[in-house]
Image (tube, helix red, strand yellow):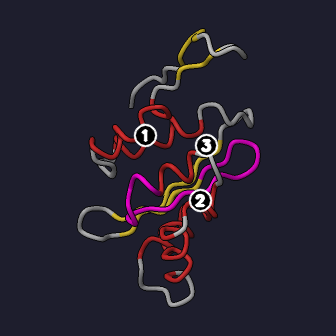
Amino acid sequence: TALARAAQRLAAGNDPLLSPQFDAMAAHPFLVGGSASFDTDFISALKGRAVAKMGAEGVQVIAIRDRTGQGFGLALKVQDGSDRPRAQVALEVLQAFDLIASEELQLLAEYDVPVYTTRVGSPVGTLVTGRL
């Protein structure tokens, strides 16, 4: 709960200590998550409207502004600590609350329904959640 509240404050845009942090993360997504990262790709896809940061043991935090500019916070924890469903569940929650547009979701398709492959790149399956 505390993480979600902090993310909401980060997204609200009216805190003089947190607003520069949001702006810096939104302007430099690669510095948040590096290459081949949900955080980097998410921030880039939402073009300054949201920031994301993964944590240890399956934690994901998202600070997002809706189309009117109101700030929302999302914090989730995958119970078994796995990173595998973290991004997919976050996207599903954002969809359920109408906080992500279909165009933005299309840019993040690889995380919405990820395809898992062998070490040589052959597809072996997908992870499907029970849609909210």
Residue 30 - label: 2
Label 2 neighbour load within 10 Å: few <14, some 14-19, many 20+ = some
Q: Does dot 2 land on a helix, a strand or a loop? A: helix
Mark closer to the chain start, 3 or 2: 2
Residue 36 - label: 3
Residue 5 picture location, percent across and down:
53, 67
Task: Quadrant for the N terminus, please.
Answer: bottom right
In the image, 132 versus 110, the foreground residue is 110
Residue 52 picture location, percent across and down:
54, 57
Residue 130 picture location, percent across and down:
45, 23
Q: Residue furthest left?
A: 68
Check whether the beta carbons of the residues at disc 1 and disc 3 lie within 8 A of each other: no
The reply to whether the magenta stretch includes residue 56 is yes
What amino acid is found at the position of numbered circle 1 in the picture?
Leu
Residue 69 picture location, percent across and down:
29, 71
- Which numbered mark, 1 or 3, is in the foreground of this view? 3
Q: The magenta stretch spans which residues?
A: 44-60
Mark closer to the chain start, 2 or 1: 2
What amino acid is found at the position of numbered circle 3 in the picture?
Ala
